[in-house]
Amino acid sequence: MKYAPSLDRLHSEAAFEVLAKAKALERKGKRVLHFEIGEPDFDTPEIVKEGAKKALDENFTHYVPSQGITELREAVCEYIEKTRNFKPTPEQVLIVPGVKPGIFYSMLALINEGDEVIYPDPGFPTYSSLVDYTNAKHVPIKLLEKNEFRMSPDDINEKITGKTRMIILNSPHNPTGSMLKKNEIKAIYKIAEDNDAYLLSDEVYSQMTYEQKHYSAAEYDNASERSILIDGFSKSFAMTGWRLGYAIGPEELIKKMTVFLINSVSCTNSFIQKAGIKALKDFDSVKKMVDKFRERRNVIVKGLNEVNGFRCIMPMGAFYTFPNITGTGKKSNELADYLLEKAGIAVLPGTAFGPGGEGYLRFSYASSIENIKEAVEKMKELL
């Protein structure tokens, strides 16, 4: 078959590839400790499930407006007002089936061939994949351990040009768990404003923070001029399989993005949108989950720093650690394969998130403390 050449410009994700390898080993009887997948290991809160069940019982199972049901868009606006210091209008909100479509539609709507896109390296693989897909120019900003993996406004200033169309932010950050400080976010917004560039702010881990408060670049223009806020339900509400997210941006942009949604999925699942309304009001479940993650974070960081050849700084958000493994003398891919094959520990090489990830591994601590301690002891013995 002859495929469209553009397909070669889209890339897969290593997390699912490593998961497949790990599952294959499990089928052969090997015990595997999973630290590769970025998915909360908690059940979806009961109030959310009850919301979906009620909608089903009321036969709320038909087409709904493509932009999303009004009640959920209004609930998103109220939630953003409580968590981000501004209140968008429902016309600024697009409900999408997961966070990725919000990123995809935003970039398809705004990026032209030859435009420059600034994004973090290491960073979520979808960013660089879509830069390739849109035939734009990659402008990665290398995140440095000495700067706690925060994206530096000075580095952005050095790389920005008249061709820069978009700056992508991700705080809390995947894969490092870093968080931008308020003055850094404000400086980056000012750079975007001075250079007439768009700011795509991926905030899917916004509620998963520890010692530091989350700040959004969108509060500087209420997501009405150049900032696009992307968030969803997968991480904060343990709803990965539900596939529910939202994009908030200028009204005209949201209209254009809605056309992409119409042409791809018609509308986001109707009864799941009803469940989303319940989720946005359930702050207690989020707090309990984050408290558990904080406890696990402290255990895994302490443990990794006791492994020969490892060095790990404390992440401020999300549920990932990103230890430096250069002391082992092994490359990231080599060590990740070694740990899986020899010790049954599934992790991701830092290079799964870009060239800037060489010398690091990503551990998702969405796992029990018992599993974390077991993995640490196995690595101590192996290394």
Image (spheres, rainbow, N blue to C red):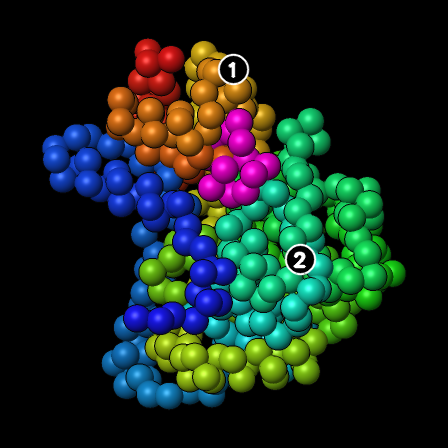
Task: Name the side, left or right, on which 243 lies relative to 116.
Answer: left
One can see residue 233 in this view: no
The residue labelled by disc 1 is 327
**Quarter of image, res 18:** top left
Q: Is residue 361 magenta?
A: yes
Left/right of residue 18 with respect to residue 140 in the rendered view: left
Residue 235 x %, y %: 45, 53
Residue 165 percent across, percent down from the top left? 73, 64
The nearer-to-camera label among 2 and 1 is 2
Rendered position, 5 above or below 375: below
Percent from the top left, x then y, of residue 354?
Answer: 54, 42
- The residue sitting at the right extreme is 194
In the image, which residues are magenta? 351-362
Query: Circle 2 sits in a helix, a strand or a loop, which is it?
Result: strand
Task: Give 229 or 129, whichever is nearer the viewer.
Answer: 129
Residue 334 falls in image quadrant = top left
Residue displayed at 48% across by 72% down: 96
Q: Amino acid at mark 2?
A: Lys
Residue 143 appears anywhere in the view: yes
